[in-house]
Image (cartoon, helix red, strand yellow):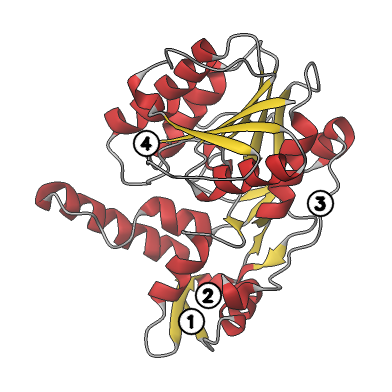
Amino acid sequence: MRVAVTGASGFIGGAVATALADDGHRVTGYGRRVGGWSHPRGTYRVWNIGRGPLRDPERVDAVVHCAALSDDWARYEDALRVNRDGTRAVIRTFPGARIVQVSTSSVYDAFGPNVDEREDARPPRRYLSAYAATMALAEAELGGRDAAVLRPHAVYGPGDPLFLPSLVDAVRAGRLVLPDAGAVQHSLTHIDNLVDAVRLGIHAHGPRGVFNVTDAEPVRLSHAVAELLERRGTKVRISGVPTAAAMRGAHALERAARISGRRPPVTRHAVSRLGYERTFDLTAARERLGYRPRETNFEGAEAW
């Protein structure tokens, strides 16, 4: 197949583009940075989707749309331009292609726990970040098209620039403070599982709609974090603060940041993602996509 991958200069897009090229597909990766991805059997082009459709696109059978502004403190206008308007640009650039969009579980209600959350859950009335709000709008752009939307949660694995680094940076003198000490269940998503879901989704006229994509079973967040950091040579003592108190503190920091113009050290979005249960029902992906996820696995984390 001829496949275009947006966001190929990033963690998820790069992993997807490499895996599909390894599978023998003719892959064109797109990203904002010069030289953002390379593969012996692939090509790379610079494209900032927030600036509109590509003028001279290749003909492709499928598009894997991974590009997004995922900063939880981004201005709404910036997030809207990249996430919603960028998705419109992808649709206009490749009007006849099957589209697999890598979205996010952040589109679910973040003001409380998600317990075995299904894709048809009622949309929240408000969001904790422009990222979440505009990704929901981006998903809506694909309604009625030959498209599959994948919603992973906490993607990790080789090349991860967010989940593991943020944990490492938060360790102070061998101590890591998490909301409620991480005593909640989470459905994490290994990059290999997400890539497998993309492989299943790219075929023309395949199942349409929205699909949760995570590892096979939830894990206790504190246990997962401790194992991950220990494999990296960092032994930590995990302590906690009540999630409600952490949310109030983050809200105060956000208000101060809006006055100062500086990024807050902690956001409510970040506290919410860690402090409440985040587990997701995989029935739709298993039954309609044929998704067979592996268990959460930190093997090789020493080199990540």
Q: Earlier in the sequence, mark 2 or mark 3?
A: 2
- Mark number, residue 239: 1
**Tag 1: residue type?**
Ser
**Tag 2: residue type?**
Ala
What's the CA distance linking mark 2 and mark 3? 27 Å
Is disc 4 in contact with disc 1, using a CB cutoff of under 8 Å? Answer: no
Residue visible at 79% across and 43% down in the picture: 282
Asked which secondary structure carries label 1, the reply is strand
Residue visible at 43% across and 17% down in the picture: 54
- Residue 95 place in picture, x, y as percent: 58, 9
Asked which secondary structure carries label 4, the reply is helix
What's the CA distance linking mark 4 and mark 3? 30 Å
Q: Earlier in the sequence, mark 1 or mark 3?
A: 1
Q: Earlier in the sequence, mark 4 or mark 1?
A: 4
Left or right of 268, for residue 61: right
- Name the mark nearer the viewer: 4 or 1: 4
What's the CA distance linking mark 4 and mark 2? 27 Å
Quadrant where the N terminus lies?
A: top right
- Mark number, residue 181: 2
Residue visible at 50% across and 24% down in the picture: 138
- Mark number, residue 293: 3
The part of the image, by quadrant, that contains residue 170 is bottom left
The part of the image, by quadrant, that contains residue 24 is top right
Residue hosting label 4? 130
Which sits in the foreground, 303 or 79?
Answer: 303
Q: Earlier in the sequence, mark 4 or mark 2?
A: 4
Q: Earlier in the sequence, mark 4 or mark 3?
A: 4
